[in-house]
Image: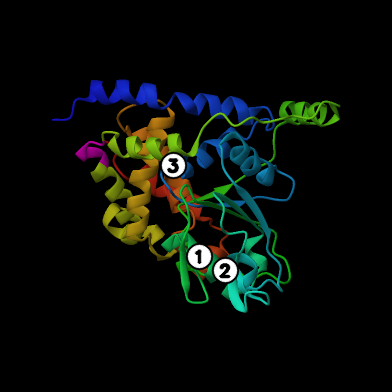
Amino acid sequence: MTDIREINERIQQESAFVELLNLEIGKAIIGQKYMLERLLIGLLSNGHLLLEGVPGLAKTLAIKSLASAIHSRFSRIQFTPDLLPADLVGTMIYNQKKEEFTVRKGPLFSNFILADEINRAPAKVQSALLEAMQERQVTIGEETFHLEEPFLVLATQNPIEQEGTYPLPEAQLDRFMLKIVIGYPNKEEERLIIRQNLNPEPISINPVVTTNEILKARKVVKEVYMDEKIEKYILDIVFASRFPADNNLGKLKQMISYGASPRASINLALASKAYAFIKRRGYVIPEDVRAVCHDILRHRIGLTYEAEAENVTTDEVVNEILNAVEVP
């Protein structure tokens, strides 16, 4: 039997830096609490994030601020249709003095990568990035380099149907732990944003956390206690997306072309633990699972043409599933 009180106390101590990070990032970012929480979940459970939102919602600013608040290196890569894999990973350069090829490393060798407008780059560039995300390593010429931890990719895409975009295939979408959809700030927040931008004093974000603290926190997150009932709840949710008819969701059978993969179950468990950690709790409750469920399943459930014709979104499908599956 795991001693929950002991785990609770440890997590109270270990998760203190979450407050520090939030305060520091909050200097630059007003509102967007949901996005910042999801960024931390990705950071703590070693998963990558896909952000979707119209331009100008502080997606770039958020990841930049996060990288500045942690002692780490940050790269921003703007994806364009003429980008090549070598522009990401680096290339071999001939050194005339030494008469040999030397490796020039690309922007992928950082802790935090912002892949801006990932759906604008051709498939071969996307796959180069996704190999780095999956394998945590990059091959240049004949040499293989391991990427240093923490390694977090934050990819953004604009939801507006535009010419000249290459949508990510399902298999590649599955590698992102979370898909976050960001909305506009409310009036009060936007008023503060205007004031902040008119302020003559520049905002400086100081590093308050080291990468070692993050790596240590990741180990602690895995120790968060998860009861068998919660495990069963996670499995019920994922299986309901695969076999809706078994869960009295016959009407969804026409809507779903394929359900969530086992990666969804793994990530749902990991993200729930990270969410409990952020809330400074040593155990997972069903509310944690429900809180992260949409972000984990949103890009893993395929809709049929009928569903698209009726303008049904994956979020609505996830809502139906959550309402039908029994909460422990």
Residue 52 appears in view: yes
Front residue of this view, candidates 250 and 85: 85
Residue 211 against residue 89 in the figure, above or below:
above
Disc 3 crowd rating (10 Å Cα; few below 14, some 14-19, many 20+) is many
Q: Quadrant of the N terminus?
A: top left
Circle 3 residue: 292
Question: Mark 1 touching mark 2, by CB under 8 A?
Answer: yes
Task: Check disc 1 and report the residue beneath it.
Answer: 130
Give the residue at the far front of this rendering.
97
Viewer-side residue, 230 vs 221: 221
The kind of secondary structure the magenta stretch mainly shows is: helix
Residue 251 in picture, x, y percent from top left: 39, 58
| Labelled disc at residue 91 | none
Eye-nearest disc, 2 or 3: 2
Asked whether 296 or 64 is in front, the reply is 64
Percent of width and height locating residue 145: 47, 64
Q: At label 1, which amino acid type do we have? A: Leu
Pointers 3 and 1 in contact (C-beta within 8 Å): no
- In this picture, is 195 found above or below 89? above
Q: Does the magenta segment cover residue 227?
A: yes
The answer to whether residue 95 is left or right of residue 233 is right
The x and y percentages for residue 85 are 60, 72
In the image, which residues are magenta?
Answer: 226-230
> Which residue: 64% across, 52% down?
75
Q: Is 304 covered by the magenta stretch?
A: no
Residue for badge 2? 126
Marks 1 and 2 sit apart, C-alpha to C-alpha, by: 6 Å
Sequence-first tag of 2 and 3: 2
Q: Residue at x 57, y 39 (%)?
A: 35
Three-letter amino acid code at the position of disc 2: Gln
Q: Describe residue 308's horizontal placement relative to residue 165 as left or right.
A: left
